[in-house]
Amino acid sequence: MIQLKTIVPASPEAVYEYVTAYAITGRTGRRTLEEKYGRLVGRDGDTYSFQDTASKDKPNAPKDDSPEGVIWRCTFDPPNRRIMEALDPKWADRTDWFEPWDEGTLWTIVWVGKSRGFRTLAQWLLFQVKGKRQATAGVVRPVVAHFEEVNARQT
């Protein structure tokens, strides 16, 4: 398990909607979700399945034999959490937690790998050396910067 925490200067509801592209009301358009996650292939209540062909082209993507791309099962629980389960065993599952914190939101991202043994240790070490910096720069920092900019415009 790998964890990354940050404080975002906005309400949990605002951060949730911005990060997940899923409206707190649950009334989110299909196009909006497909732009974020890939082609919608199934739905059961607040759980959606998406086929993400774009993830195959990412620099650190595991190589697999599937030309169709990874299928993600996303469960939305606004404004508290989003669970993304990869149906491909080469990908880690991810859960995002959004909790009120002072005058903002504590956003916790947890990745749970599916490998075992030495490979798990190697993945953890690689994340500590390289992945944490990439996740902070590519995932966390843009969200924080967005809300800092929104807050600056409001003052």
Image: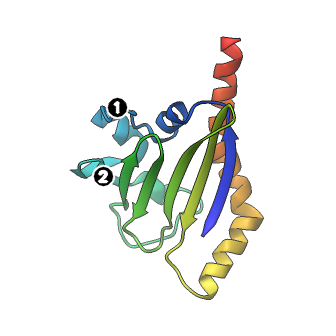
Residue placed under numbered mark 1 in the picture? 25
Q: How many marks?
A: 2
x%, y% of residue 120?
61, 80
Residue nearest the observer in this picture, 72 or 51: 72
Q: Which mark is residue 131?
A: none
x%, y% of residue 19?
52, 40
x%, y% of residue 73?
35, 58
Residue located 46% across and 59% down the image: 56
Residue nearest the observer in this picture, 150 or 78: 78
CB of mark 1 within 8 Å of CB of mark 2? no
Q: Is residue 6 above or below residue 67?
A: above
Say how the picture is coloured: rainbow
Residues at marks 1 and 2, CA–CA distance in whole angstroms: 15 Å
Residue located 38% across and 73% down the image: 65
Q: Residue furthest right?
A: 129
Amino acid carrying label 2: it is Thr
Residue located 68% across and 31% down the image: 103
Asked which quadrant contains residue 151, the reply is top right
Q: Residues within 10 Å of mark 2 (few under 14, many from 20)?
A: some
Q: Nearer the viewer, mark 1 or mark 2?
A: 1
Q: Secondary structure at mark 2?
A: strand
x%, y% of residue 141?
69, 41
Q: Residues within 10 Å of mark 1 (few under 14, many from 20)?
A: few
Left or right side of 7 for 31:
left
Q: Of marks 1 and 2, which one's residue comes earlier in the chain? A: 1
Residue located 40% across and 34% down the image: 24
Residue placed under numbered mark 2 in the picture? 47
The C terminus appears in which quarter of the rendering? Answer: top right
The N terminus appears in which quarter of the rendering? Answer: bottom right
Q: Secondary structure at mark 1?
A: loop
Amino acid carrying label 1: it is Thr
